[in-house]
Amino acid sequence: MRLKFFNKLFFTTSGVFIVTLTLVFVLMTVAVNEAFVSEKQNVLLSCSNTIASELAAEDGDVSEATESVVTTLSKVNDIDIFIIDEFGKVVLCGCDDFTVNHTCIHTDLLVSNEFLNNVPEEAHVEMSAIGGIYDNLNYSASKHITLSDGTKLNIVAASDVMTAYELI
């Protein structure tokens, strides 16, 4: 009799313990995922604003200093950064090939008008497919600036969609 009671109590307690641990694990995973996404969005916004202020200070001239800022931000934050002219052509890219050769696979691509027409004055983050560059959804921060001569440049900082589930 005592052994049956002990077995019932042991397995019930073990079951409750396992269910509790599972719930704690799921809740922690969701919390870490939310924190990761929030941090990634803040990084994208910060990079877009930094590059916009650099370009505005140089009135749109893409100098070595601007290339250096774009490349450094791209590498340090593990994101793709593009400066796109008003016609959808990538004029500056943060990838390694562009740094070495001043051309890369992205400079041969045209960004869709649909994406360019939705780039706001103020940087914001959204899940979007950057038509012409990416077909899949990515977190991207985009912003456009108008230079003193009326030329419009679009700044896009994009990141692959990655969640905490991929980190575990």
Image: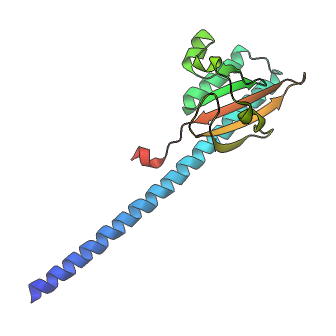
Instruction: Tell which of 160 and 52 is nearer to you.
Output: 160
Quadrant housing residue 61? top right
| Image side of residue 3 versus residue 149, left or right | left
**Residue 49 seen from this side:** no
Residue under the point 60% across and 16% down: 98
Does residue 44 lie above or below 10 as drawn? above
The residue at 64%/28% (across/down) is 132
Picture layout, residue 37 above or below residue 150: below
* The one of 18 and 112 positioned closer to us in this rendering: 112
Residue 44 visible in the picture: yes
The total number of labels drawn is 0
**With respect to residue 68, does 119 lie above or below?**
below
State the image coordinates of residue 156 (x, y, percent, origin top left): 68, 32
State the residue lying farthest toward the right. 149
Residue at 15% from the left image edge and 86% from the top image edge: 5
Res. 131 image quadrant: top right
Compared to residue 94, the image places residue 139 above or below, namely below
Residue 7: image location, x then y, percent? 15, 80
Residue 31 picture location, percent across and down: 50, 57
Which residue is nearer to you in this view: 147 or 43?
A: 147
Q: Residue 78: image x %, image y %?
A: 54, 32
Q: Looking at the image, what colour scheme do you see?
A: rainbow
Kindly give the residue lying farthest to the bottom in the view shown: 1
Could you tell me which quadrant the N terminus lies in?
A: bottom left
Does 19 sit left or right of 31 as displayed? left
Q: Which residue: 59% across, 28% down?
A: 74
